[in-house]
Image: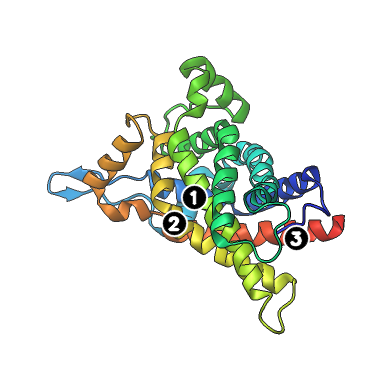
Amino acid sequence: MADPSEISFAGIFVCSAFAACVAEFCTIPLDTAKVRLQLQKRVPVGDSEVAPKYRGLLGTVATIAKEEGLFALWKGIVPGLHRQCVYGGLRIGLYEPVKTFFVGSNYSGDVPLFSKILAALLTGAIAIAVANPTDLVKVRLQAEGKLPVGAPRRYGGALHAYYAIVSQEGVAALWTGLGPNIARNAIINAAELASYDHVKETILKIPGFTDNVLTHVLAGLGAGFFAVCIGSPVDVVKSRMMGDSVYKGTIDCFFKTLKTEGFFAFYKGFFPNFVRLGAWNVIMFLTFEQLKKFLH
């Protein structure tokens, strides 16, 4: 990752926040498709089930673009960028200082994987606890398209959504889904940062590999793969709790989903999630590494 002795916390924060925003803008259509797939429930009619509206990544993207317009794929981009400015900056900006705290400032050699995972878990939890309101608004806006045709939209935009949620549900409602969101983002942050850090470190030990674009791409893909494999179940629970108010809490959402739809419902949207997180990590880490070199 970064050498904190060479780049300040403020520098790393700005680099990571900007890189995260670039990645978010490029991949949010896939995230919108992922959220719609996760919010889609089986609807039984007699002894059969209604055919699902959304089918697969490309089908979901095409359906949204056809029914709601191309720009609907970027619904939630404003709070998404708000989120990345806060969450993206904090989780990466705090990673190196926290990792150094765990191993000690005088430690030399490769940092143990356990310390990397622990540092990433903690920074992910801290960052999303601050950024949860932006995540809630992003999911609410992305979920608008599942309302019946002709039904009035709840929110006129990101700022109106913040205002409406606070005025109608209270300030505390901005932290709806905080539990599963902390779990999801702590876990995914650990999978992304620790795996990127470790995979990059391992690749650089292979003869012929250097700290270049190819290494960053391979490490970024590895980070995305580990993140989606580990984080999908909690990601589904988080999306459903934020996008639907029928659940009483995290446990209620988990067991209702498991009972009505089965275990594999927790991996709904797995492919678009992997495509998105793989692309997101590659774009983010490539941008981040180039900005670091520029600051050097």
Can residue 57 be spotted in the picture? Answer: no
Of the pair 226 and 153, the residue shown nearer to us? 226
Task: Name which residue lies at 28% across and 52% down.
Answer: 51
Residue 193 x, y percent position in the rendering: 60, 56
Q: CA distance from mark 3 to mark 1?
A: 23 Å
- Upstream in the sequence, badge 2 or badge 3? 2
Which residue is identified by label 2?
A: 230
Of the pair 150 and 228, the residue shown nearer to us? 228
- The residue carrying pointer 1 sits among few (fewer than 14), some (14 to 19) or many (20 or more) residues within 10 Å by Cα, namely many
Residue 245 x, y percent position in the rendering: 37, 29
Does residue 190 appear to the left or right of 44 in the view shown?
right
- The residue carrying pointer 3 sits among few (fewer than 14), some (14 to 19) or many (20 or more) residues within 10 Å by Cα, namely many
Helix, strand or loop status at disc 3: helix
Which residue is identified by label 3?
A: 289
Of the pair 212 and 136, the residue shown nearer to us? 212
In the rendered image, the quadrant that contains the N terminus is: bottom right
Contact check, label 1 and label 2, Cβ < 8 Å: yes
Can residue 295 be spotted in the picture? Answer: yes
Helix, strand or loop status at disc 2: helix
Q: Is residue 269 above or below residue 172?
A: below
Q: Quadrant of residue 281?
A: bottom right
Task: Name which residue lies at 44% across and 35% down.
Answer: 179
Tally the numbered discs: 3
Image disc number at residue 187: 1
Image disc number at residue 92: none
Helix, strand or loop status at disc 1: helix
Residue 234 x, y percent position in the rendering: 41, 47
Q: CA distance from mark 1 to mark 2?
A: 7 Å
Residue 233 x, y percent position in the rendering: 38, 50
Residue found at the far front of this picture: 106
Amino acid type indicated by mark 1: Ile
